[in-house]
Amino acid sequence: MNPGPPLLSLHGVSRRYGDHHQWAAVRDVNLTISPGEFVAVIGRSGSGKSTLLNVIALLDSDWEGTYDIGGVNAKQLSGPDLDFLRAKTFGFVFQSSYANPYETTARNVALGLAIQGIPLREQGESVSRALDLVGLTGRSSSLARSLSGGERQRLAIARAIATNPSVIVADEPTGNLDSETGNQVMEVLSELNRSGTSLVVVTHDPEIAKYADRVMRMNDGVLSETRTSPRRKTRDSTTLRSVTSVNAQAGRSARLRRAVERVFRAINNVTSRPLRSVALIAAFALAFAGLVGAAGIGSTASQQIADRLTAAARDEVRVNVPSGTTTDQRIAWMTRIRALDHVESVGEIATLDAGTARTARFALLPSLNDSPFPGSTLAADPDLFNVLRVQTTPSDAARLFAASGGQRVAVVGHSVVESLGLAQDGLGAEVWVNGEPYSIVGTITASPRQPNLLTSVVVPMHLFSSTSSQLVVRTSAGYSGPLAKAIPLALSPTAPGSISVETASELHNLRIGVQTDLNGLLGSLAAALLALAVLSGASAMYLSVQSRTQELALSRALGLGQAGVAAVFLWEGVVIGLAGALAGISGGLAISVSVAAAHGWTALAPWATIALSPLAGAICGAVAAFLPAMRAAKIDPSEAIR
Ligand SMILES: Nc1ncnc2c1ncn2[C@@H]1O[C@H](COP(=O)(O)OP(=O)(O)OP(=O)(O)O)[C@@H](O)[C@H]1O
């Protein structure tokens, strides 16, 4: 029988290894294979059989010589063209069947078709035909992990023939099987060969060779023919297939289907490895729970501050007293303010800066360059304690403060007792302000309207009478607004604009400032958590590439290009990041609701953060997957054969 024009034709092909390509695993091989031929390559272990098969099947491109495949010079093809030609020309059966254990038999068989972007309906038809040919129709919806060794190998054959290749290359296809199952597998392969598919089988087993038309022997990388005796086979010449042209263009819809297939493959990869995926998703979920929780607590707390300021705005006005204002004038202003309707009380307070008052526990320390007192030093008049509803120990500390006359006395915040290392309540002890000793007559235990008093040393205002200060005016509830207008007129009828007045509503700006700071702080915290999630996700995915080498190499062998492998990984990252963000949103909301409930606040949902989190999750997932994707894309498809 005339074998017809060659399908594959190798001339002087060598494959060298070593740092300087000094050592040839395959030497100067000349081989032509005609359509429909069954060629067996036998030889000792390490003789170079698999290396040759890698070259023949376009899994390896680092060889020397000439290789024509269906009239195309393989040396001149680009990487993507080689992927395309390989997928269209070859079907692969390896010693290990490399079925994805978590997918059904049918889905495993469809792998090559899906990678090529074949429409689903056609995939279904080809898969049914292939399963029928290998006798696995009844197991099509079983998970691959439930198949026996022989069934898995038949699955691998079905996967190889589903794409209707011209040539099936098989490396030790019966190597893992007992002799009876091995014979069954060889019968299936022979049947395929009889229907026109060319076969190149590499094997240790001389028994396999009896199925072949030609038997070649590999010896230390040198190939020689040992037998050419085409078996009598009834072959319909019209079924003989030749290599598909590499120029066969894939249409736009095939490209779209391939893109969609990559997304589905990514989702499948995530769901089929639950343990690994849960760990990765948990890292992202933690970060997003922190982000949403922090934003939720931030906005809830900020609303609380706003509510308190609103309450304060109803009954408090502050009049700024410029420095240099005389004591008489201050007293005159206070008297005039007290005379206004709806004014309940007036007190005075001033914050003394470090230049005005240097405060320390001991007299000598300032001169020893001791670190300055970390809290504030304030000057106040005795009425302020009443105006701000300050609570003290002893409860009449304000009276002692008032009764001091010319003596130097101080009232200190509760926290100051600890930070200055004072015994018990600090009563009777001294603090030094501007090198003068002040006797402590009381400690402040609560100051809800001005919490910084708890961290301050308060000394009598009249000892610092020329400093700038504030008159704190307590009004009847709801009268702060009208009095803020009336006070400047009362103090300076001719130039009311010269009097600077604040109500707590003006602290609104302060609240925005505080909220911005709070958001900044929480934002940095969340960014750190996200960076951690991206890093841990990236390292876990990077490490997983190693354990997925065979799966990835098989996908490469079946035509998935480097870009395709990278795309699948990036989509996996997106799916994981998205799932993590969604889980994190629920967790974060639960955290902020519990914190709010514990404080008796009304929880606010951080809608903007919630809305942006899925997008941020997808982006972070893709960033985490970037390096692993690059590494996975570099996997050599010839790894699949080892
Ligand atoms: N990537 C590689 N780098 C260096 N040497 C390699 C590589 N791949 C194969 N070899 C070497 O090339 C030689 C041929 O290996 P090959 O796997 O082709 O042999 P084989 O005949 O298929 O053996 P076996 O039947 O045991 O699979 C061996 O000595 C092997 O160590």
Image: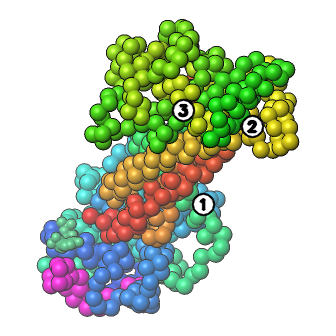
**Image x and y of residue 549, in percent:** 34, 59
Residue at image position (42%, 34%) is: 434
Query: Is 342 left or right of 36, judged from the image as shown?
Result: right
Q: Nearer the viewer, residue 584 or 191?
A: 584
**Is 273 located above or below residue 220 in the figure?**
above
Find out whether residue 225 is within the magenta segment: no
Residue range corresponding to the magenta coloring: 5-29
Q: Which residue is mark 1?
A: 260
Give the structural element (helix, strand or loop) at label 3.
helix
Residue at image position (74%, 37%) is: 501
Q: Residues within 10 Å of mark 2 (few under 14, many from 20)?
A: some
**Image x and y of residue 362, in percent:** 32, 28
**Is 379 located above or below residue 568 in the figure?**
above
Quick check: is the Cβ at mark 3 less than 8 Å away from ligand 1? Answer: no
Q: Which residue is mark 3?
A: 464
Q: CA distance from mark 1 to mark 3?
A: 77 Å
Q: Nearer the viewer, residue 447 or 604?
A: 447
Residue at image position (33%, 53%) is: 543
One can see residue 238 in this view: yes
Task: Name the quarter showing ligand 1.
Answer: bottom left
Mark 3 or 2, nearer chain start: 3
Q: Marks 2 and 3: in contact by CB < 8 Å?
A: no
